Image: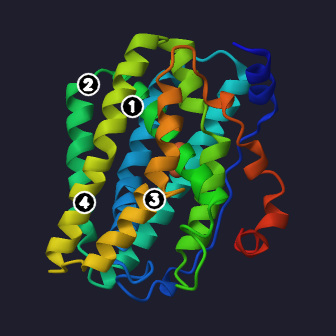
């Protein structure tokens, strides 16, 4: 463990924030730039969260009793609280999307089946390695979202998504190292961590794409060429998420990597001042 890592871990407190988002602000199915590919990408991510984040909680909880470090113990409690809130908030968002006619139950069932299979077939140590890898994806998504507001969360769609993403992104950055540290303190198999992450990073976008196809198919919606081009730029263009994040994923696969090697703290400090409109939604 490096000196920086120890310092970051001991100073970071993880506290869930209760928020009051107005889901009725989501008024049209293809709210995200009017683009069905980008909108279903947001729905697919949101459909994966309720069960996905409960899976994260269960994976960490399995090892909770083995953790003796009081700082990490407190961080686990904060992590569980934050993920439980995220799960419930995304359930509300998904319910609103379903009320508009999106087949959210079918997309959610897709992820439910995948998670149930992982729970049935894999060991608790693999569950935790999957969780740590997915937490790296969410922290990377979070950094990109907060650093590139023009790409994702600006604009005037008036949906609650922007506020939800800012809040969720901040908390993902705050707790990004918890599952990783629990893995290190208990399982600590560097080779397994890396092999599992390679598989997770490859399959994550495939699973999202399947959920998007389910949503588009059920709405009998065919994206236009313009939508395809715009979605391509969003992902693969200059500063697009996939092109920007490729080196970040490679870093995780290096032996000895730790999430706190990537400094994202400045993105969550002073959030009250940086995002007063989100701060106002805290209850
Ligand atoms: Fe989360
Ligand atoms: Fe998380």
Assign a secondary structure to mark 2.
loop
Q: How far apart are marks 4 and 2 (CA)?
A: 23 Å
- Mark 3 and mark 1 in contact (Cβ < 8 Å)? no
- Mark 1 and mark 2 in contact (Cβ < 8 Å)? yes
Count residues near mark 1 (Cα–Cα under 10 Å), then give few for <14, some for 14-19, many for 20+: many
Q: Is residue 194 above or below residue 221?
A: above
In the rendered structure, which disc, 3 or 2, sits on the residue that comes first in sequence? 2
Percent x, y of residue 249: 48, 35
Q: Residue 211 carries which label?
A: 4
- Picture residue at 76% right of the left edge, 20% below the top: 6
Residue that numbered label 2 is attached to: 122
Q: How far apart are marks 1 and 3 (CA)?
A: 28 Å
Mark yes or no: residue 184 visible. Answer: yes
Mark yes or no: residue 127 visible. Answer: no
Count residues near mark 2 (Cα–Cα under 10 Å), then give few for <14, some for 14-19, many for 20+: few
Residue occupying the far front of the picture: 238
């Amino acid at each position: 463990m490096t000196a920086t890592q120890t310092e970051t871990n001991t100073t970071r407190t993880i506290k869930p924030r209760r928020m009051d988002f107005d889901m009725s602000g989501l008024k049209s199915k293809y709210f995200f730039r009017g683009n069905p590919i980008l909108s279903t990408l947001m729905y697919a991510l949101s459909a994966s969260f309720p069960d996905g984040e409960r899976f994260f909680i269960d994976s960490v909880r399995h090892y909770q009793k083995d953790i003796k470090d009081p700082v990490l113990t407190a961080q686990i409690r904060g992590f569980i609280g934050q993920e439980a809130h995220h799960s419930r908030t995304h359930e509300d968002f998904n319910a609103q999307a379903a009320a508009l006619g999106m087949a959210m139950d079918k997309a959610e069932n897709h992820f439910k089946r995948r998670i149930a299979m992982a729970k049935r077939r894999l060991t608790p140590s693999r569950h935790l390695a999957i969780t740590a890898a997915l937490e790296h994806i969410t922290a990377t998504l979070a950094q990109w979202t907060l650093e590139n507001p023009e790409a994702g969360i600006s604009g005037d769609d008036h949906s609650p998504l922007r506020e939800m993403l800012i809040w969720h992104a901040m908390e993902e950055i705050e707790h990004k190292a918890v599952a990783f540290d629990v893995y290190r303190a208990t399982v600590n198999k560097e080779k397994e961590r890396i092999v599992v992450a390679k598989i997770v990073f490859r399959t994550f976008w495939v699973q999202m794409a399947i959920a998007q196809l389910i949503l588009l198919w059920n709405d009998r919606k065919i994206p236009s060429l313009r939508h395809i081009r715009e979605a391509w730029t969003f992902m693969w263009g200059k500063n697009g998420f996939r092109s920007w994040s490729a080196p970040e994923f490679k870093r995780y696969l290096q032996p000895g990597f730790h999430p706190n090697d990537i400094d994202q703290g400045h993105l969550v400090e002073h959030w009250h001042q940086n995002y007063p409109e989100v701060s106002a939604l805290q209850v």
